[in-house]
Image (tube, rainbow, N blue to C red):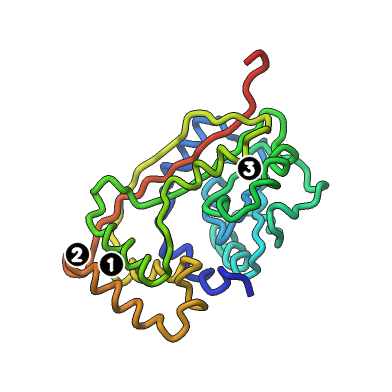
Amino acid sequence: MGRFATTAALYAQFRPPYPPEFFRAVAERLRLGKQHALIDLGTGPGLIALGFAPYVGRIVGVDPEPAMLEVAGRAAARAGHELALIESAAEALPRDIGSFDVVTIGRALHGMDRDLVGPLLERLVAPGGVVLVCSARSATDGRNGWLEAYNEARRFWSGATIDRKRYRSDLAAVLAGTRFRTGEAIAAESSHELSAKDLASRMLTFSGSSPAVLGNKVTAMLRDVEQRLLPFSRAGSLSEVVIARADVAGTPPRGR
């Protein structure tokens, strides 16, 4: 069983959501169409792959965790989208998988072998194609007044270091020595209401505080986090501002 196996059923429900506006903004900027093929590396429950499904043709999702692929497959069936799923680490994909116009990577980038990802992207991205490193995160500019208390609870229960900029530095590192250059990022902002209980349950979607790691401490963790958040809530409800972002990398035009 992989380290995300026990988080699979919770991930799509409790992680910060990608709003439809984000996928539309990316599709419009990149002029995506049904002639384009997309592969999502570390697809998890398929959030990114299925978000782009209305804007592209062939879609492939790759993940080493079978439980995640099961969740992604059910989500694709509910949405009525065809999503080919491959159980594999991204770095282990066979060479005959072909090339794609869009390669997307979500929160999985920091867990990949950066010495292998650059060469992988070189062969996966078709001429004129792009790499999109996507994230949907709680805004850190003070509008989520509960966030500091939440991150403190996360550090307490998992010992995690919260580094919101790590995936961007990872992208620069893995692209070093490749034909790709980063361009202007694409972002969309959204807000929604959720309960203190749901935010506490989000803690279970992180590998360091998953049900498998916490074991019989799950109930105590949920109770503790919910109590920490209640002072920031109104009748148990909180607002969350989410910023969804795609860092874009492509091949510069000839002569540049």
Marks 2 and 1 in Cβ contact (< 8 Å):
yes
Q: Secondary structure at mark 1?
A: strand
List the residue tagged with mark 3.
Answer: 103
Q: Amino acid at mark 1?
A: Ser
Q: In the image, what residue occupies the spot 41% across and 42% down?
A: 21
| As drawn, 23 above or below 211 | above
Between disc 2 and disc 1, whose residue precedes? Answer: 1
List the residue tagged with mark 2.
Answer: 233
The residue lying furthest to the top in this view is: 255
Between disc 3 and disc 2, whose residue precedes? Answer: 3
The percent position of residue 56, horizontal first and vertical second, equals 61, 41
Q: What is the distance, in whole Å, between disc 2 and disc 1 at their CAs?
A: 8 Å
Between disc 1 and disc 3, whose residue precedes? Answer: 3
Q: In the image, what residue occupies the spot 32% across and 68% down?
A: 153
Q: What is the distance, in whole Å, between disc 1 and disc 3 at their CAs?
A: 34 Å
Observer-nearest residue: 129 or 138? 138
Q: In the image, what residue occupies the spot 68% across and 29% down?
A: 179
Q: Secondary structure at mark 2?
A: loop
- Identify the image quadrant of the C terminus: top right
The percent position of residue 241, horizontal first and vertical second, equals 30, 50
Q: Secondary structure at mark 3?
A: strand
